[in-house]
Amino acid sequence: MQKRGQVSVFVIIGLVIIAAMIFVFFLFRSFQEKAREITNPQEYLKSQIQDVKKAVVKCIGDESEGALTKLSMQGGHLNPVKYINYYDSKVTFLCYKVKDDEPCYNFMFTRMEIEDELGPLLKKNIKSCVDSSLSPFRKKDYVLSTGDYGFDFVFSDEALLVILDYPVTLTKSKIIEIQNEFSSNVKTDFWKTAVLASSIVNSEARGEIVDLVKISPNNLYFEVGRRVITGGNLYMIIPRNGGQTFYFAVET
């Protein structure tokens, strides 16, 4: 009992020390900002606009990664119509039956369909995240103002690039700092997995047997798995580099 009591005391002391160190760190940082503000207001605003930039870029990156994950988890659709529930995800049927006596029909998505779904979601979610992230900066000793919100993105084979034309202006007395544009480039294997998914869907639509033993070992970038589900098969395309797994279903 005595040893346990000693251990508890040491744990408490350790937590107190850590809390004190964190407090001193933030206090020191606050003093640094205050000193910079007094001695060089221009540099102070420059440092603040860099903090704003980090917050906005983080929003772009986080929301982009979240949308890409959802696309991959749900078979390329953010709002699936025909799907199966799999671990709380709505996995789209990319090939499904129209006539019982025929193979499934190919309903593979196109790039335009993906962009039409992705664009509005990113535009809305990033704006919401950015405005929320800017709130703490509005409470400081300068005026933060924003211009019109402009959004654009490029979804290439290698990455999702999102660009915001959203001017943020910091004003203190007669000193002004402006950041007009923000961007984040998120690497992704989405389109590479989509190409492989399309070849599997094409085979299923022709009524062919998809031989995973031939597919997976010969593919340098992806491993393909399959599970039998109610009414069909669930496919998993798993990047060997540790990226996001792409799921889709086929009705049989």
Image (cartoon, helix red, strand yellow):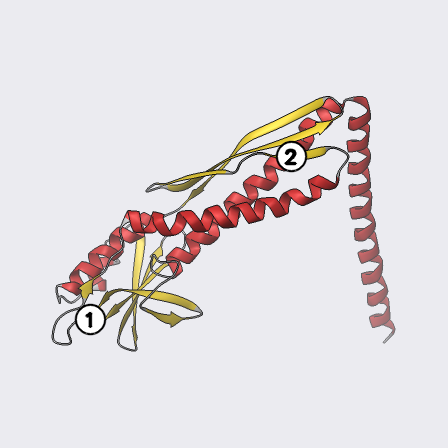
Of 229 and 137, nearer the camera is 137
- Distance, label 1 to label 2, CA atoms, is 54 Å
Q: From the image, state whether disc 1 or disc 2 is nearer to you.
A: 2
Residue 3 place in picture, x, y as percent = 84, 71
Q: Quadrant of residue 178?
A: top right
Marked residue nearer the N-terminal end (1 or 2): 1
Residue 40 visible? The answer is yes
Q: Amino acid at mark 2?
A: Ser
In the image, residue 119 above or below residue 104: above
- Residue at 79% across, 52% down: 18
| Front one among 175 and 24 | 175
Q: Quadrant of the N terminus?
A: bottom right
Q: Is residue 136 above or below residue 66?
A: above
Q: Is residue 231 left or right of residue 50?
A: left
**Image height of 74 relative to 67, above or below:** below
Crowd class of label 1 (few under 14; some 14 to 19; many from 20; radius 10 Å): some
x and y, in percent, of residue 200 in the image: 21, 60
Q: Secondary structure at mark 1?
A: loop
Q: Quadrant of residue 104?
A: bottom left
Question: Dot 2, crowdedness within 10 Å: few (<14), some or many (≥20)?
Answer: few
Q: Is residue 159 left or right of residue 48?
A: left
Residue wearing tag 1: 97
Amino acid carrying mark 1 in the image? Lys
Q: Secondary structure at mark 2?
A: strand
Residue shown at 68%/32% (left/top)? 48
Residue drawn 42% across and 57% down?
Answer: 70
Residue of label 2: 145
Quadrant, the C terminus: bottom left
Give the mark count: 2
Q: Give the farthest residue toward the right.
A: 2
